């Protein structure tokens, strides 16, 4: 599925940019190095899974992790962004899960190979509907939460990002170019862990939008 929803309207998603290692506590829990600039990887838009869907864990992994994140929808094209006006290009906000086959990622990293199989499998980009920007008036200081079977597993505060939204947007526009329909996963806080068959998942973005998923048994 390569479409997302904004105000009930289906929009075809373009590129999916993801920012890794953007919260200090998450870096610490996985024992990673802190990057000197935004760490960017990609997912194919075929990885999109919209709220209400069933997550099917890939057969090639025995340890798929959840990573809850604020997600941006880009509303126009840009090769660069003026400082102080970066957020003007954002058309909407969502909460999502960057699913990661952690065992596969660790294996690929140990060989110095790309992570695509660990990050880009079908259903690895789970998303709520997007809300327009006026529904999230302060995205640089907002909360998001992730629950499994009613138990809080992750609590995010975007004010704690290492690289904030303007820095991320400016970096992506200057390095890669941004296009209408691009999505940006902005990084996950600490508390990541394994998904199990039958889990009931709930995401909440500052009370403005929620998403629900079930992991296939």
Image: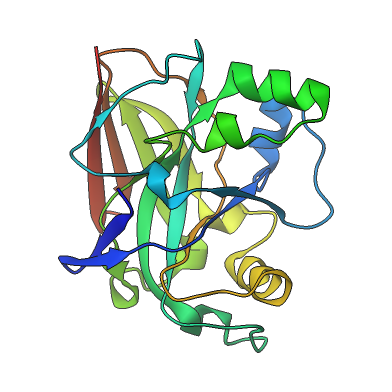
The scheme the figure's colours follow is rainbow
Residue 188 falls in image quadrant: top right
Left or right side of 85 for 180: left
For residue 70, above or below residue 97: below
The image position of residue 187, as x and y in percent, is 57, 48
For residue 59, above or below residue 137: above
Query: What's the residue at 56%, 74% (across, down)?
Result: 178
The image position of residue 21, as x and y in percent, is 68, 43
Q: Nearer the viewer, residue 59 or 206?
A: 59
The image position of residue 208, as x and y in percent, is 25, 59
Residue 72 falls in image quadrant: bottom left
Q: Report whether residue 190 is seen.
A: no
The image position of residue 49, as x and y in percent, is 31, 42
Q: Nearer the viewer, residue 53 or 196?
A: 53
Left or right side of 85 for 98: left
Residue 34 falls in image quadrant: top right
Left or right side of 215 for 143: right
- Residue at the left extreme? 8
Q: Report whether residue 94 is seen.
A: yes
Instruction: Please state, as top left, top right, bottom left or bottom right, where the C terminus lies in the image.
Output: top left
Query: What's the residue at 52%, 66% (across, down)?
Result: 140
| Callout count | 0
Q: Nearer the viewer, residue 92 or 155?
A: 92
């Amino acid at each position: 599925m390569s479409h997302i929803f904004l105000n009930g309207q289906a929009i075809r998603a373009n590129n999916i940019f993801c920012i890794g290692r953007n919260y200090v506590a998450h870096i610490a829990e996985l024992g990673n190095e802190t990057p000197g600039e935004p760490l960017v990887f990609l997912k194919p838009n075929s990885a999109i899974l919209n709220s209400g869907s069933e997550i099917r864990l890939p057969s090639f992994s025995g340890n798929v992790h959840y990573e809850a994140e604020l997600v941006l929808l880009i509303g126009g094209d840009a090769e660069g962004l003026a400082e102080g006006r970066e957020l003007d290009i954002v058309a909407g906000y969502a909460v999502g899960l960057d699913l990661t086959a952690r065992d596969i990622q660790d294996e690929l990293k140990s060989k110095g190979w790309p992570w695509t199989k660990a990050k880009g499998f079908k259903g690895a980009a789970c998303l709520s509907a997007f809300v327009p920007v006026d529904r999230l008036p302060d995205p640089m200081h907002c909360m998001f939460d992730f629950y499994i079977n009613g138990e809080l597993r992750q609590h995010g505060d975007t004010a704690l990002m290492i690289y904030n939204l303007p820095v991320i947007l400016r970096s992506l526009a200057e390095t890669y170019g941004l296009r209408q329909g691009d999505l940006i996963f902005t990084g996950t806080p600490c508390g990541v862990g394994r998904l199990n068959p039958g889990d009931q998942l709930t995401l909440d973005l500052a009370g403005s939008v929620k998403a629900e998923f079930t992991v296939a048994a």
